[in-house]
Amino acid sequence: MTGWRREKCRSGYCTLWKCWLIPSLAPGRRGIVMDGNKLEQLFAKFKEQAEAISARVYRVHDSSAAGRQLKNIIKELNIKKIAAAKSELVSDCLKAIKSQDVVVHTSDLRQHSEDAELGLSEMDMAIAETGTLAQDSTALDQRLVSTLPPVHVALVRIDRQVDKFVDAVDYFNEQDLLPGYIAFISGPSRTADIERVLTIGVHGPEQLYIIFVDQAGGETCE
Amino acid sequence: MSDKQQIKRNIEKALANENLRGALGRFGNDYVGARERAYTGKDFQELRDRIAAVKGDAAARMEELARRFTESAQARGAKVFRAGTAQDAKDYIKNLAQEKGATKIVKSKSMATEEIHLNEYLGRQGLDSVETDLGEWILQLCGQKPSHMVMPAIHMTRDEVADIFSKETTQELSADIPKLVGVARKQLRKKFLAADIGISGANIAVAETGTLVIVTNEGNARLTTTLPPVHVAVVGLEKLVDVFTGVKSIIEALPRSATGQKITSYITMITGPTPAAYPDGTVQEKELHIILLDNGRTEMQADPVFKEALQCIRCASCLNVCPVFQLLGGHVYGHIYTGGIGTILTAFFNGFQEAGELQNLCLGCERCKRFCPGKIDIPKLIRELRSRVVEKGGLPGGQKFVLEKVLPNRKLFHRLIKAGQLGQKPFQKGARIRHLPMFLAGLTEGRSLPVIADKAFRDQARNLSVPEGSSKESTPDSKEKVGFFAGCLTDFVYPQLGQAAYKVLKHLNREMVFPAGQTCCGVPAVLMGVRESAVQLAQQNIEAFEQAGVDAVVTCCPSCAQALKERYMELLETDPAWHERAKALAGKVQHVTAYVADKSGDGSSLRLKQTGGRVTYHDSCHMKGCLGITEEPRQLLAAAGLELAEMEGSDLCCGFGGSYSVKFPSISRQILDKKLHSMEAANAATVALDCPGCKLQISGGLDSRGKELPVKHTVEILAENL
Ligand code: SF4
């Protein structure tokens, strides 16, 4: 049951538990859906749920299309500075961004996330039932880019969907060692503490963009 | 000032606070719908069974899990400290801050740290400890206390918040909520970035893995646990669960029950230290300190009755649906944990003395019980608290005499009630005592005396005959012998309910008998905490019905029905022989309306006259909440050709509970006002209900306001339409 987990790693971003999380997301693992129909159903459900809690959901064909989508967001919001937590998908996506448009930081993120206008990262899983993203956020950078900047753009591979929150718990439970910091994110940060009026963006991001990528490249899960 | 006076003063203050009532009232109304929507597709009963199992098991093995948690968390690199008392926990944090040379602390919302008054303490040590949850920060800035477990500043208006923030930022701010939230973001962001230590609580702690689970919406917990290089989590022992998968049911229920959300914006699961940025620019593992707080929890766990309270997941739904809380908010309770469950927790964390007065605030409507995802029988715990307080402190003389001496002596008790009838003025208005024995206990003011009937039902019952105009039908199961349990109100105030029941049952070809040995059901004694008397009454009633040899027992009063069905077994738990007899009786008891609906095919075989007209139905707390009867009366009313005009909040309490209206008249009046208001808005010709206590309260209320709206028990309406 174990053994194989350490065999391959392609994430590269996870400094502490490297190699554990991503391979176990490989095809056929429990909780990760492979069937095409089911995948479409889950996506439709996810989109509906996530949009109901003020996230914006897109779906693109590959990483360069994700880059173009990101560019649109940058333009629309007039973003000048990005803090990005490294992953292969994130790097591929960033290739579409020209340096004259915007400054992109991928290191010293503690400092750069403070005033970056947009944080970019790849999430590990999408939960349809509640429109929730899940991530092994053990690496500090992953947390910085999704907490400090006012806009968070999250990339997710389309085949990383599960139906229910409890499936995600089962998934993490099956790992030999739980990641040090698991983050579940559902929509932007919100509060209703003043007169119960729902207000978006109190401490975390005010806007959450979620881009699903069909063909992420690399060791995909076809 | 005594606790009692303090509470009374707090009540008056709360009732005078329009903001508070507006906000809580609106929330209370929206909450139920939002919660229900969030639970769509989920089986709440099944879910709460799972939670009760997970939490109940964890509570039973608290020490074992605490040890296991310590080992697992340490194996992952965390430091775990077991704090026996509040002071231990505070000292640990103070010493840690000193050792680290830390002065700046950010905190994310945590009940446990509020319970131990951590902020005040750290402040006195010269440490700057900032609450970062928006509501908590507002309160910290103006020196107030939370009024709700989940929405701490629900009692404040945007104008007040604008004033507070203006002072803090020394600029003139307008009362624009998004702008105010923006100001908080900016101010608190600076604090986060500069903090040396982050302090959080946890919603769940997993023994198997040493994991802390934190559920929030604002994202402040994520910043608190990410930015400072030291993280301290203060976790009550009741947060422990055995295995990681145990978090499932709790997380499924918590946001849904707390705020009507399917999920909160953030759920964070932390296992061991993770990398953090240190002031020198390096990234290293942070320090994670977990304080497991006892502070009364082991004592609670050792208590055979109160250990159930450890199943609480702090969702606050019991507050949100509580009619008293909706009026008063949490400040009245004077402690961090508020409402019914808060009263119990206060007893253990702060002392029984303080909780003793607070438990009086409970109306006994039992609404909370239906909503609790931890499946805690909160009303039962309150009753237990009450009887322990009475055991210790006793009752005032008059009440003591009546409850301990008069009530268990059936003949004396009934003679005295009849004597009361002679003494009452003719045409008495505004009858207001739900549990009749209370009026003998000297708890009433003159105007509140109930109108006692000229002839009690027990005297009328001696010569019950076949009422005129009823036809005799022969059904296969004819001549089932049905015992009628009157209860004090039907017996002495509304004997016509007994007559109506008789007529309807006769029509269904049932033989109705009235065992004369029956007496008060015992609810008042239970509610007043006089268990001994309640036990005697239970035994008298069980005997009376055994001797009558009946096949079924019906009553017009849902509170009596619940007493006979559930309470007697609880009261006689320790006596196996009596417990068996109580169980045999319980199996036969039904509310008369449910019985009739059942035996008449929802009224169809009664062939009722179709009178037409609009009727609005009030769901009595004990009818809907305890007996779970809602559809049957509506079906029967429809069978009588009546058009049902639902009122808003048909299941909200009418504001009466035993001696409540006398102890807290202002609360009772306001709850009644709300009820009458929605009743009138339904624009019906009749109010139907199924509880003589509610009938007394509501008709009394309408009457004293000069309203002529008839209030009838379902069985009365049926009898009229035969
Ligand atoms: S007692 Fe039940 S309803 Fe009340 S806060 Fe606890 S879990 Fe929620």
Image (tube, coloured by chain):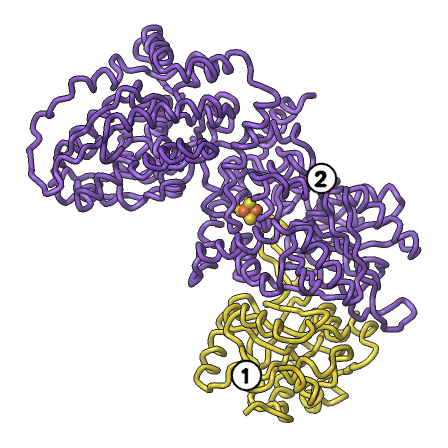
- Asked if one can make out residue B20 in the rendered structure from this viewpoint, the answer is no
Residue under label 1, please give it.
A59
- Vertically, is B378 above or below A107? above
- Vertically, is B106 above or below B144? below
x, y percent for residue B303: 61, 39
Question: Is there CB contact under 8 Å for labels 1 and 2?
Answer: no
Image colour for chain B is purple
Horizontal side of A169 relative to B363 (left or right) equals right
Image colour for chain A is yellow
Q: Residue at x 75, y 40 (%)?
A: B143
Q: State the residue in front, B675 or B582.
A: B582
Quadrant of the image occupied by residue A80: bottom right
x, y percent for residue A5: 67, 84
Quadrant of the image occupied by residue B490: top left
x, y percent for residue B510: 15, 34
Residue under label 2, please give it.
B144
